[in-house]
Amino acid sequence: MNIFLAAVNYYSNQWEYPWFLWVTAGWGIGLIFDALKAYQINPMFNKDWEERKIKSFMEEEEKQKWE
């Protein structure tokens, strides 16, 4: 698909503005996110982070003493 878009870009304006690169970059970003989701890779919010957050919420709730 990207090759087709590059060909359309070339034949329409002879590389004056390579707009197909925006499409290719967007497609690549989407592909990266799909791969991270498929392989269950989450560098920001991993299992350790989740456990720390749950523990902090539980400690905070204990301090409030609901009546």
Image: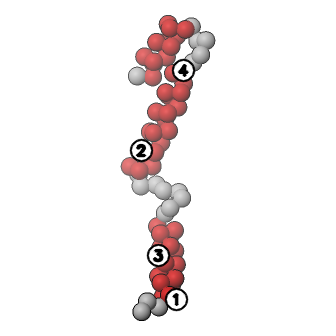
Residue 53: x %, y % from top left: 50, 73
Q: Amino acid at mark 3?
A: Ile
Q: In the image, which is nearer the foreground, mark 3 or mark 1?
A: 1
Q: Nearer the viewer, mark 2 or mark 3?
A: 3
Locate residue 67: give its quadrant: bottom left
Q: Amino acid at mark 4?
A: Trp
Which badge, 1 or 4, is on the more N-terminal residue? 4
In whole angstroms, how far apart are the C-alphas of marks 2 and 4?
24 Å
In the rendered view, would you say 3 is above or below 55?
above
Of labels 2 and 4, the one closer to you: 4
Are dots 1 and 2 in contact, CB under 8 Å?
Answer: no
Instruction: Give the residue number, with chain letter if any, for mark 4.
Output: 19
Give percent across and percent down for residue 57: 49, 78
Going from N to C along the chain, the mark reached first, 2 or 4, is: 4
Tell me where residue 2 sits by quadrant.
top left
Q: Disc 1 designates what residue?
A: 63
Q: Position of residue 64 (x, y in %)?
A: 50, 87
Who comes first in sequence, dot 4 or dot 3?
A: 4
Work out whether residue 18 or residue 28 is closer to the camera in this orientation and state it: 18
Helix or strand or loop: what does disc 2 sit on? helix
Secondary element at image label 4: loop
Quarter of the N terminus within the rendering = top left
